[in-house]
Amino acid sequence: MALPGHPAGAGQAPGMAPASGRPRYFDGMDENRARRVVDALRERGINGHIARVGVGQFGVRVSLPGGREADWDTDGTAGLEAQVMRDGMLVGYVPKIEGSEDFTEQEVVDAIARADYDQPVAKLRARSPEPAAPLPIAGGVFRRFLDGFRYR
């Protein structure tokens, strides 16, 4: 039931399935989702890290050539988008990907892997590039110590 004066679905509780019946992935990126996405990116050879951008606010940071970094979903909104930064300055972005508020984690990983950052307004490639050699898991042996044993 929609709230008075709000569009249909605006009163829907976070995490509830949309009309399509698929579970919602995005109601903002939480720490555990970000960790799973980062781990999957690193398995594909993509240098991803958890981006801690505020109290309880997380996203995925991908290191790019030329000293650039792409910060994915750090604003807490539904949908997947990124800002490309170099030395603290915005040098490009990936506009919100249509339908990404209903993406599964694997679809999020695929979208991040397909992003082409060569232009200021990045686009998604038709196909994912071939996976590179896997990178070690961020944090290595001390990962659970550094993260305070908050997850399994």
Image (cartoon, helix red, strand yellow):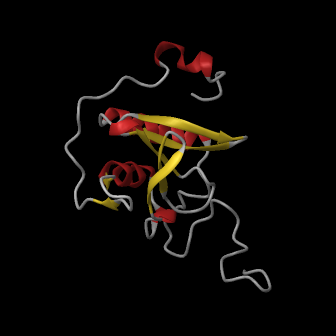
Residue drawn where x is 65% and y is 28% of the image: 150
Extreme-right residue of the structure: 4
The one of 17 and 132 positioned closer to us in this rendering: 132
Q: Is residue 86 left or right of residue 4?
A: left
The image shows residue 123, relative to residue 59, as above or below, that is below
**Quick one: quadrant of the N terminus?**
bottom right
Q: Looking at the picture, how far across and down is residue 35, in whole percent? A: 51, 36
Q: Quadrant of residue 125?
A: bottom left
Q: Looking at the picture, how far across and down is residue 139, in whole percent? A: 50, 20
**Quick one: quadrant of the C terminus?**
top right
The image shows residue 149, relative to residue 109, as above or below, that is above
Q: Looking at the picture, how far across and down is residue 51, in whole percent? A: 56, 38
The image shows residue 48, relative to residue 150, as above or below, that is below
Q: Quadrant of residue 95?
A: bottom left
Residue drawn where x is 53% and y is 61% of the image: 23
Residue drawn where x is 50% and y is 70% of the image: 21
How many numbered discs? Answer: 0
Q: Looking at the picture, how far across and down is residue 50, in whole percent? A: 53, 36
The one of 69 and 16 positioned closer to us in this rendering: 69
Extreme-top residue of the structure: 141
Q: Is residue 127 left or right of residue 32?
A: left
Residue drawn where x is 58% and y is 49% of the image: 74
Extreme-bottom residue of the structure: 5
Q: Is residue 100 left or right of residue 136?
A: right
